[in-house]
Amino acid sequence: ETGVTQTPRHLVMGMTNKKSLKCEQHLGHNAMYWYKQSAKKPLELMFVYNFKEQTENNSVPSRFSPECPNSSHLFLHLHTLQPEDSALYLCASSRETGDSGNTIYFGEGSWLTVV
Amino acid sequence: AQKVTQAQTEISVVEKEDVTLDCVYETRDTTYYLFWYKQPPSGELVFLIRRNSFDEQNEISGRYSWNFQKSTSSFNFTITASQVVDSAVYFCALSPQGAQKLVFGQGTRLTINP
């Protein structure tokens, strides 16, 4: 059983829809991350939260809106997406961000298809 | 700049063969961490190992072993007596000093045929 759970596992949405991806970690960590993995590009870091504060936004378009209400939960709100946004979205967590030696643990991902 | 190169895009071997996945990295930092992750078809990235840049001892865990050579900036991963369940995409990653932002390689798709 993974310590990082993501829902839904699969999502198909139209370009005008609004949906959200949810992530929950049960590891007692304080940092959470969103990564994007598409067929054409390597894993891309999107957002980083440390103790609920956003510390990294890797030039992500505003149609992706993250929310971190507490250290255990992370959301990615989606609206007006494009077909090229279809990808696997991975949530991850670690103890915190200051020490590069902290291992990042990933969830199973949410497979998103934009039609 | 930090960079990780996994030159082998795909590898296919027959079960029970030994296989080595290559990883070469670039960094100017003196302190850093290296990681290997396994991604089965389900999608989850499974953590396999973390290695500190000051620890060049090789590590063995069951059928898995890792060879870290700072002189050649390489962190290679060997699976001995491969099994079908080892089929997955394997990622090597680098974490630079003072930052929690993993830099991933492109990944190597490993297929173990029965």
Image (cartoon, helix red, strand yellow):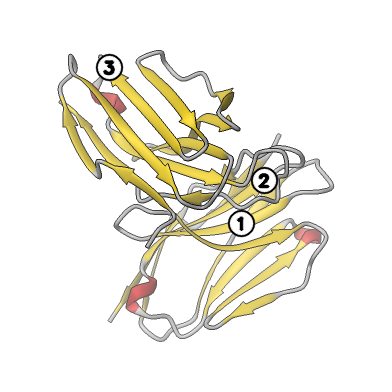
User: In this rendering, which labeled residue sits more in front, label 3 or label 1?
Assistant: 3
Q: Which mark is residue B14?
A: none
Looking at the rendered structure, the kind of residue marked 2 is Ser
Q: Quadrant of residue B9?
A: bottom left
Q: Which mark is residue B35?
A: 1
Judging from the image, what secondary structure is the residue with disc 2 in? strand
Residue B102 picture location, percent across and down: 60, 43
Q: Chain of mark 1?
A: B
The answer to the question of whether label 1 and label 2 lie on touching residues, with beta carbons closer than 8 A, is yes
Compared with A16, B47 (above or below) is below
**Separation of disc 2 and disc 3 at Cα?**
32 Å
Q: Residues within 10 Å of mark 3 (few under 14, many from 20)?
A: some
Q: Residues within 10 Å of mark 1 (few under 14, many from 20)?
A: many
Judging from the image, what secondary structure is the residue with disc 1 in? strand
User: In this rendering, which labeled residue sits more in front, label 2 or label 3?
Assistant: 3
Location of the C terminus of chain A by quadrant is top left
Q: Which mark is residue A79?
A: 3
Residue B29 picture location, percent across and down: 81, 42
Location of the N terminus of chain A by quadrant is bottom left
Residue that mark 2 sits on: B95
Relative depth, front residue between B9 and A95: A95
Q: Is residue A7 left or right of residue A27?
A: left
Looking at the rendered structure, the kind of residue marked 3 is His
Compared with B86, A35 (above or below) is above
